[in-house]
Structures are given as C-alpha cells and as structure tokens.
Image (cartoon, rainbow, N blue to C red):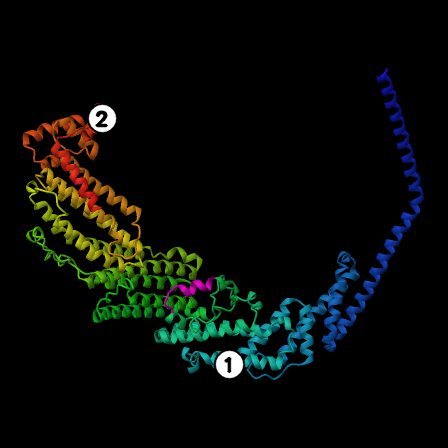
Amino acid sequence: QALEEAQKAIQQLFGKIKDIKDKAEKSEQMVKEITRDIKQLDHAKRHLTTSITTLNHLHMLAGGVDSLEAMTRRRQYGEVANLLQGVVNVLEHFNKYMGIPQIRQLSERVKAAQSELGQQILADFEEAFPSQGTKRTGGPSNVLRDACLVANVLDPRIKQEIIKKFIKQHLSEYLVLFQENQDVAWLDKIDRRYAWIKRQLVDYEEKYGRMFPAEWCMTERIAVEFCHVTRAELSKIMRTRAKEIEVKLLLFAIQRTTNFEGLLAKRFSGCTLADGTVKKPEVPPPSTNPFLEDESGAETDEIVMEKSDTDKPKKPKVPDNPFHGIVSKCFEPHLYVYIESQDKNLGELIDRFVADFKAQGPPKPNVDEGGAVLPSCADLFVYYKKCMVQCSQLSTGEPMIALTTIFQKYLREYAWKILSGNLPKTTSSSGGLTITSLLKEKEGSEVAKFTLEELCLICSILSTAEYCLATTQQLEEKLKEKVDASLMERINLTGEMDTFSVVISNSIQLLVQDLDAACDPALTAMSKMQWQNVEHVGDQSPYVTSVILHIKQNVPIIRDNLASTRKYFTQFCIKFANSFIPKFINHLFKCKPISMVGAEQLLLDTHSLKMVLLDLPSIGSQVLRKAPASYTKIVVKGMTRAEMILKVVMAPHEPPVVFVDNYIKLLADCSTDTFQKILDMKGLKRSEQSSMLDLFRLRLPAPPPGGDSAGSLSLSAPTPEQESSRIRKLEKLIKKRL
C-alpha cells in the first residue's frame, strides 16, 4: 500500500513539473514577441553609431591628409608632429576598409607624405650640418628641433640616419687631429684624446642640447661612438708600433682609459649601448680604476687576502660599469708585455729574498713569540695580490691564466730556493755520547746534531710553509673569482700546495731524525750492558736519563717555535713515537742474556720511558695540556708491548707449555722470530730453544680449549718464593717512582 502511494505521489510530481515547463515555454515565447521590436531598434542604433563614427574619422582623415601635405610643403614641423601622429592613429581604424578604393588612396597619400617628410628632414639636416668638410655652416634652429619630433613619429630608420650623420659630422675633426701619423696619436699622449671629447661634449650641450629630444640621449651616443672610434684607432696604431710598447707606457694608457670609462659610467646610464656592439659585461669589476684605489692598499696589507674577504658583502652595492672595456679592450692583445714584466719582477724578487736570507741569516730564536714566519713570504703574496687585482682590471680572460702560470712558477721557486734550500743538512758524523761515558753516567748535550738556531730555523721554515699552503689555497679561490667563468677550470694550484706540504713533511722529518739520532747512543749503550750481571734493582739506568735529557732539551724548543701551528707539533710527536718505540724494542731484543734482576731493571726503565713519552707534548711546559688521544694511543700500545716482552722474559720457562701459552696470551704475536728473540733474551741453550720452538708451533694453529686457562693459571699460580719477592719489590719501586 505504501509503495502504491509513493508511486502516485511521483506521478503527481511529474505532472506538476510538466505543467511548469509548458508555462515557461509560453512565457519565453511571449517575451520574444514583446522584445522583437526593441532588438531591431538596438541593432539599428549600433549600426548608426558606427556609421557616424566612421564618417567622422573619414572626414578627419581626409582633412588631416590635406593639411599634412600643405604643412609639409611649408615646413611647419611643429604642427606636423602632432597632426601626423593623429592621422596615423585614425588610419588604423580603416585597416578593415582597405578594399574601398577611396580609403586605399588616402592611405597611400599618408605614406607618400611620410616618405616626403623623411627625405625633406634629412635634406634639412644635411643643409644645416654638411658632411663634406669640417666647417659647420648651420646650427641649431627651432625648425630642426621640431623636425626631430616629426622623426620620432616617422620610420625609425629616419631617426637613426639623423643621429648617425650628426655624430659622424661631430667627430670628423677628431679623426683628422688624431690620425695615425700624428704625434698626439701615440699612447703617451692618450690624455689628449679624452680631453678633446670632454670639450666636445660641453660644446654640444651648450649649442645643440635642446635641439634633440632628451630621450635620444645624444650626448651619450656621441661619447659611445667616440669610444668605438678610439678603440679601433688605438688597436690599429698599437699593431703597427707593437715593438715600441713598454710596460709603463701600457699601464699608463690603461689607467687613463679606465679612469675615462669610470667617468662615463658616472655621467651616463649606458642605455644606448644595447644599440651598439659592446655588451654589458656579465661580471664587471668592483672598481672603475684598477690602480689608484687598490694599489696603495695592497702594498701595506699585511694579511694578504683579508681586504678581498672584507669586500665581499659590499660587492652587490658597487654599481656596475656598463662602459668597462668599451675602449680598454683594445689593450688586451698587448698584455703579454705586462705578463713578461711581472715574470721578470718576480724573478728579481725571489733573487732578492735569497740574497737577504744569506745576508741576514736565519731568524733569531725567540721563544716568547714562537716560530716566526719568514717575512719574505708575506712580501711575495702582497705582490701577488697587487698583480692579481691589477690584471683583473685589465682583463679577466687569457692574460689571467698566463699570470696564474707565472704565480705557480714562483711559488715553486720560493718553496725550493727559500724554504727547502735553507733547511739544515743532516751530517753523518755525530760527536755523541760513547757507551763508556753513558755507563759511567757522564751526561753531555752535544749529541743533538742541530744547534738551537738550526732547530728554530727548521720550525720557522715549517711555519712559513704552512702559511704559504693556506694562502695559496686562498689565492686559488680569488683567482677563480676574478677570471671568466669559462676559464675557471684551468686555474689549479694543487701542485704548488703539494710542494709546500712536502716542505712541511721534510721539516718534521728533520726534527724527528735529529731527536732520534740524539737518542741512538743511549739505546746502543742499553743493548751493550751486561744485563745478566745486574745484582739489584736501582733507580732508572743512565741511558734512560740520557734519553730524557735529550727530549727535555729539544721538545720544549720545538713546541714553543711551533706554537702557532699546533697540529704540526702533534705530528712531530706522533712521528717521533712511531720512530723511537720500534727502535727501542729492537734494542731491547739485543739485551741478551738477561737475568731476573736485569729484566726487572729493564721493566722499571721501560716504565720510566713510557711516562716521559706520555708527557712528551707538554714536557717542560708551565701550562699542562692533555696530550692528543691519537698520540697517547700510539705510546700506550708501543710501550705496553715492550713491557709485555719483559714480563714474558721474567716468567719461568718451566713448564714449557705454560710458558708458551703465557707468551701467546701476553704478546699475541704468532711470529717465530719474535719468540726466538725472547728465548735468546732468557739465555736458553739451543737444545732447549729447539724443543720450545717446536712446542710453540704446535700450540699456535689450534690451541686446546684449556690453553687460555692454563695461561691465566701461569700468571696467578704460586711461583718460587724468590721470584714472588722480587716481583713485590719491583712493584714497590714502580709505585715509589710514580
């Protein structure tokens, strides 16, 4: 029942919708009938308005064309300028009616009038400013001023022709005065060219400033054309007289030219350059004058690259110079003269540095200030900066690459002649301590091969090389900033940086060798001592005292002189530890045979050396500084191995299995050579050694599961009373020593 009711309701709804639709269609039909007449009237009104407007335009066009022709004949350019623009605008409305003969005829009359106007205006300018001869018969007039306004409306070629002819006529005198064969045409009198154009521009402003519309920028156009002509003329004369160009003359001409370009940038906007051939440089230099502003600063600048760094934030504020290179580009092919001059100057500078070093000698040792950087390297980089700034103002192209090559050459020469060439040579003869004197505890400081002055010189050369390394990296970055982006990849000073790194490495090696060699006699004395005859454990042995003495003599001097380059002092410490500790262990193996007491004494000595080596970086220093972890790790690892060797030697060789396992656990060294040396130190007979070695080889590949426990038992197992008392005594001595 509910479903039937719903269906009935839907049918009723459909019926109502159909009624509404029918009524809507009837209403629409009625509205159309009512508004039919209104629509016709609306169309009629629109067509009538269009017809009236078109007739008005036609009347204006016909009258305008007649007036235009009459005014053109009477040269009434002031009225023509306004009328012509109006006629052209009205004519645009008739573009769709060009099929009508009368309209087409009017359009052709307008074009003819425009053409006639153009020819007439050009003739008027030719009459006022004749191109033949330099004498100006005419001058500015209101007629010509109005003619320029008309030219604005005419074909742009008319305007260009007027500008071209006027500028050519204006500069005709310049070409005569500064002909190639004239004395004033050469570079030494280049100032006169720029003085002439300045006078001409002032003269133009006074006489013709109001004749041409301001938007024509005639003053700037004259200046730009003068620049193009000057560039061509200078290029021609320099090609002809290339052999006469000297570096001072070239730099003088470039300086005056860039000054003039800077003056143009202040006076003009450069809006006309888009018409010419000179494009706005992508990355113009920050200064319009390459020498006056930066040269004096560069000579006194102590920190070589600091000034450039501080300029960085200011760069965006410096206005671009659109005129940069508009004349000075002509000097670029001749910059090889400048590059050759810098090559010669730098060669003389390096020779002077060498002579000064020989005359003044090495820098005086000054512990308070640390290792002094040689003053010559700062002078070199200050000169480099001056050259770089100067050259970047002259050109950022190939000449910069040529200059970079010169820089590289003299960086290498400086590294070889001044730094490597002055490193002290190591001598083979050493008046060191003799074994006898060591054993008699006679100490002497003459073991060190290098004097205090020589040590200071090595540190000074190391500091200088580090300064050069850092500054060369900055130099490379600055050169890449200055040079054209396309040439950036060709600037690479990595080879020169590597050269300075080699100097640093050689300097550190010399310092290590010197201290190492000073300690050699003491280690030799250690290996020659009769360790089997030592009866009691005393204080540290004389050879230890000797090693400590040499360390205390050398290390504080080196540390103070390398105060400014702490990382290289750390390198020195690490290299010395890596050299001394293996040598000490090798000499330890030569101490044979060793008695139990002798081994205890050696263990005490080894511990003393370990403590001194751990303290090496800050030895003799009032400021206690923790040694670098990388260094401490090397010392602990190396000296702990030496202690373990002695502990193995002290352990009883009976039973053999326990001794072998103990060795494997303590030393973790699978080499039979090392095991053989341990047996030699213990003074075992060959027959005993042979059986021990066999046992060692058996135990190595696959030690039984109980091997480790046996080894640990050997350390904790009760030993004979005599041995335990000696170990306790040794521990007391070590505690007392600490």
Gap between marks 1 and 2 measured at Cα: 105 Å
Q: Do the residues labelled 1 and 2 touch (CB within 8 Å)?
A: no
* Mark toward the viewer: 1 or 2: 2
Residue 709: mark in rendering: 2
Q: Which of 520 and 221 is in front in this view?
A: 520
Residue 600: x %, y % from top left: 14, 40
Residue found at x 26% / y 69%: 353
Q: What element carries label 2?
A: helix
Q: What element carries label 1?
A: helix
Which region of the structure is painted magenta?
301-312
Q: Which of 669 and 212 is in front in this view?
A: 669
* Above or below, comparing residue 412 to residue 202 in the picture: above
Name the side, left or right, on which 565 lies relative to 654: right
Residue 675 visible? no
Name the side, left or right, on which 695 lies relative to 560: left
Amino acid at the residue labelled 1: Trp
Q: Which of 392 and 330 is in front in this view?
A: 392
Residue 609 visible? yes
Mark 1 packing: few (<14 Cα in 10 Å), some, or many (20+)? Answer: few
Amino acid at the residue labelled 2: Ser
Mark 2 packing: few (<14 Cα in 10 Å), some, or many (20+)? Answer: some
Residue 7: x %, y % from top left: 85, 20
Q: Does the magenta stretch include residue 308?
A: yes
Q: Is residue 235 magenta?
A: no
* Above or below, comparing residue 10 to residue 390 in the picture: above
Residue found at x 60% / y 79%: 205
Residue found at x 41% / y 79%: 188
The quarter of the rendered structure image containing the N terminus is top right
Residue 674: x %, y % from top left: 15, 36
Q: Mark 1 points at which residue?
A: 196
Name the side, left or right, on which 58 lies relative to 439: right
